[in-house]
Image (cartoon, rainbow, N blue to C red):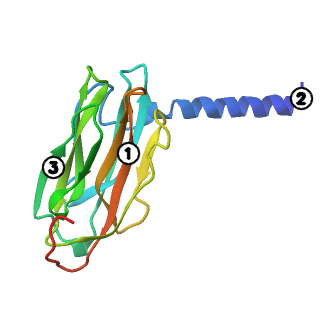
Amino acid sequence: MNPALLALAASLLATAAAQSHDHQDMSWVNGYRQSFNFQCPHGEVLVATRSYFSETDGSDRLWSFECQPTPEGLGEPSDCWWDDINRAGMEWSSTCTRNGLVAGVQSKYFESVLDREWQFYCCYYKRRCPYSCMKTSDIPEHFREEAELVVPSYGYFIRGAQTTFSGVLRDRQWKYILCRMTDFDCEFENL
C-alpha cells in the first residue's frame, strides 16, 4: 500500500479520535445527572453556551457557559432575580421578565424522566428596552448532537429561550431569544 495514503489515513484517524474526546477537556459546570447553578460575575451577561450529550450517562448533557461584560452605556444592573422555572419532560419557553438579560442558569436533573428543570437568572438594566429580537435556529440542529451557541454580534444579548423535548430521544433542542437593547431609557415593560 502507498505510504503516503497510510500516513494520510493515520492522520485522519488521529484527528477524528481527538475530536471525539474534546468534550473531556472542557470546563463543564456539571457532571452527568448533577444539578448546577451558574451565575455570571456582576455586570456581565451570558454570551455563549456549549453542551455535550451522552445517552449512556442518563441521556444527559454536560454544560459550559461564558460571560462578557455589558457595554458601558448599558450601566450596571439595578436588580437580578431567578425567573420562571420549567418542569422536566415538558416544553419550555422563557423570556426574562422586566426586559431583563440572562446572566445565569440553574438546572436540576430528574432521573424519573431523564430530563432537567431549567431556570434563568435575569438582570435588569435601568429602563432599557429590547428591540430587533430574533430566535436562533434549533441548537443542536438534531437531537443528541453536540450543541453550541455564541452570540453572533456584539450588542446582542440573550433574553431567554424556547425548548422542545423529545420523550423518545430524551433530549432538548433550544432556540435562544437574542435582542439588542436601546441606548436610551424607555418606559415600556416586559417586551
Q: Earlier in the sequence, mark 1 or mark 3?
A: 3
- Cα gap from disc 2 to disc 3, whole angstroms: 61 Å
Which label number is shown at residue 40? none
Q: Residues within 10 Å of mark 2 (few under 14, many from 20)?
A: few
Left or right of 8 in this view: 139: left
Which residue is located at x 30 percent, y 29 percent? Answer: 115
Q: Position of residue 91 (x, y in %)?
A: 30, 40
Horizontal and vertical percent for residue 31? 32, 28
Is 57 drawn above or below residue 189 in the view shown?
above
Toward the right, the furthest residue is 1
Q: Quadrant of the N terminus?
A: top right
Q: Amino acid at mark 1?
A: Trp
- Secondary element under disc 3, as helix, strand or loop, is strand
Residue 2 shows in this picture:
yes
In the displayed structure, 180 sits above or below 49; it is below
Q: Residues within 10 Å of mark 1 (few under 14, many from 20)?
A: many
* Percent x, y of residue 93: 27, 48
The residue drawn where x is 64% and y is 34% is 15
Which residue is label 1 attached to?
174
Which mark is first along the chain, 2 or 1? 2
Of discs 1 and 2, which sits in the foreground? 1
User: Marks 2 and 1: in contact by CB < 8 Å?
Assistant: no
Quarter of the figure with residue 4: top right
Q: Earlier in the sequence, mark 2 or mark 3?
A: 2
From this viewpoint, is residue 40 visible? no
Q: Secondary structure at mark 2?
A: loop
At horizontal 50% and vertical 34% (from top left) the residue drawn is 22
Q: Which residue is mark 3?
A: 83
Residue occupied by mark 2: 2
Q: In the drawing, does residue 69 fall left or right of residue 82?
A: right
Quarter in which the C terminus is drawn = bottom left
Q: Amino acid at mark 2?
A: Asn
